Amino acid sequence: MNAFTPPQANHEMLVLGDHDDRMRQDFAKSLKQFTQNNLLPGLTPVFEGRVARKFEKENGRPPADRHDIRKGMVKDIYFQTYASTNRIAQELLWESVMDPLERDIDAINAKAKKLSDASTATLETTPDFKVPRYVSAFDIHCMPGGYSTSMSDDDVGVGALYDRGVYIYSMGQMGPDNDDMGRSACNYVRRNLADFKPTAILDMGCTIGHSTLPYKELFPDGEVTGIDVGGPCIRYAHARAAAKGLDVNFLQRNAEHTGFEDESFDLIVSHILLHETSGKAMPQIFKECHRLLKPGGYMVHADLPPFLKIGPFMQFILDNETYYNNEPFWGAMRELDQEQLAQDAGFAKEDVFFDTAPMAALEMMAEPQEEAEEKEFVAGEYAPGGGWEVFVARKAV
Amino acid sequence: MDHTAEPKLKRHAKGKRPSFYEVDGLDEAMSMIMVLASELSIMRDRLDTVETIAANKGIILADEIDGFEPEQENVAKRDDRRQALFERLYYVTLKKAQEEAGKETEQSYLDVLEQVAKP
């Protein structure tokens, strides 16, 4: 993996800070890269050697699944330093954005309001909105304030924090607009769902609209709406879209019960939403998608692969997010039978499938598509095998 | 920074921070070390910025710095500064040696507390 990171595309709302703030951000990013490229590979020999041997000696059998692997690894000093460094990088990352954000928060909120006031697209937030517990219990990704902490009715703070922070988190691999998941899923729809021209598009759990905006760019005649439970994220998303000259509606709504009329949309998408919901919410979201879709419409959910598709050691690596990055549903979600859940929600068995959407960012770097699709999951790569897992279901005509 | 003002943003993430090491305090020490490493890295980046800005104005600082022959005065000053750095870096170790020499122990400390408290 190349250590070079293309700079994040600047826009009026982006918080970068001064020279030293930006270098602190770069440091956090470089530390993440180092951890992933240089420390993470060492976990394999450490596990296969001393950790597996010790486990077998103590338990009279080799480690069988990711829980066994975890039990052995957490006691090993190499893993401890790997996991501790990863966590510290994550904390420094948010700190490095919070410093300039806190200095300028009043001006940033005022700028967002000005941009939103001048936009014709809908902005809707609700002061006493009930944020579901799976979002409010922890600050997901260890981002201080989480998605929903709002200090005032105009506050966009955590939205601004997320915009810059996620770019550092993804080490630029989501492209200069942090929109690779949306762009890749959108390309997938255009290429693979023949003659499907969506006119009403809903992006669920859109946070600040990173992945929402490509749909407006690639389906300019369609009406695009993003919903999220985080008020500051929705306000920031609306202002950011306005800054980029795109008319996209942003509403503070819960994907489980959106409040839209039946058959309001012909394409419903989500990007890394499902693993941040819950065992109760996820089936309900599929049901809500089925209710909201027009006959013949599609839902496309882009997330990371279910555990069934990867070996126990890789499962263990991914599951570290559950324990160390405030991702309570990350592991459990990957064990669910999503095909069955979709059928329970009303989709026909033959209309439900998993597929891979090649990463738009990789394609732009001219990597042949077939090569990207055939690559196997390698620890440390941002998207497994160079593509995003998409879960697709079509509502019967 | 004004620490008396009401915070405008939350600074700490909700959710118990896991312990990675079994030795108490090592998690804190590791994060402090990484913060120090970050500040060192930022200073080097800033110097790089200074060199680049100077170069754009025709002064090749990097070359001048690399070709710089320190005067005796510089050498002595730097030697002293390095020794002072090591003293700061090893202050706990040095203090421990001094305690051994002065026969200072936990017990001798507690003895003083008791003596001082006596009416």
Image: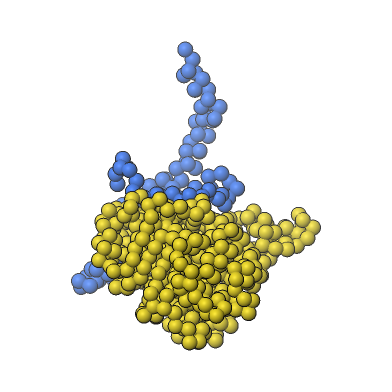
Chain colours: A yellow, B blue
| Res A204 seen here | yes
Quarter location, residue A237: bottom left
Task: Point out residue A355 in the picture as x, y percentages from the top left corner.
Answer: 57, 78
Q: Is residue A74 left or right of residue A183?
A: right
From the viewer's perspective, is residue A372 above or below residue A69?
below
Query: Where, quadrant-wise, is the C terminus of chain A in this rendering?
Result: bottom right
Residue occupying image coordinates x 67% and y 62%:
A66
Identify the residue shown where x is 72% and y is 62%. A63
Q: In this rendered view, identify the residue nearer to me: A271 or B43.
A: A271
In the rendered image, the residue lying farthest to the right is A60
Name the spot of residue A211 as percent of width and height, x first. 43, 71
Q: Quadrant of residue A97?
A: bottom left
Asked whether residue A144 appears in the rendered view, the answer is: no
Viewer-nearest residue: A6 or A203? A203
Q: How many marks?
A: 0
Nearer to me, A111 or A4: A111
Residue projecting furthest to the top: B119
Image coordinates of residue A348 in percent, x first then y, are 62, 76
Residue A286 is situated, as x and y percent measured from the top left of the image, at: 56, 67
Residue drawn at x 73%, y 63% is A64
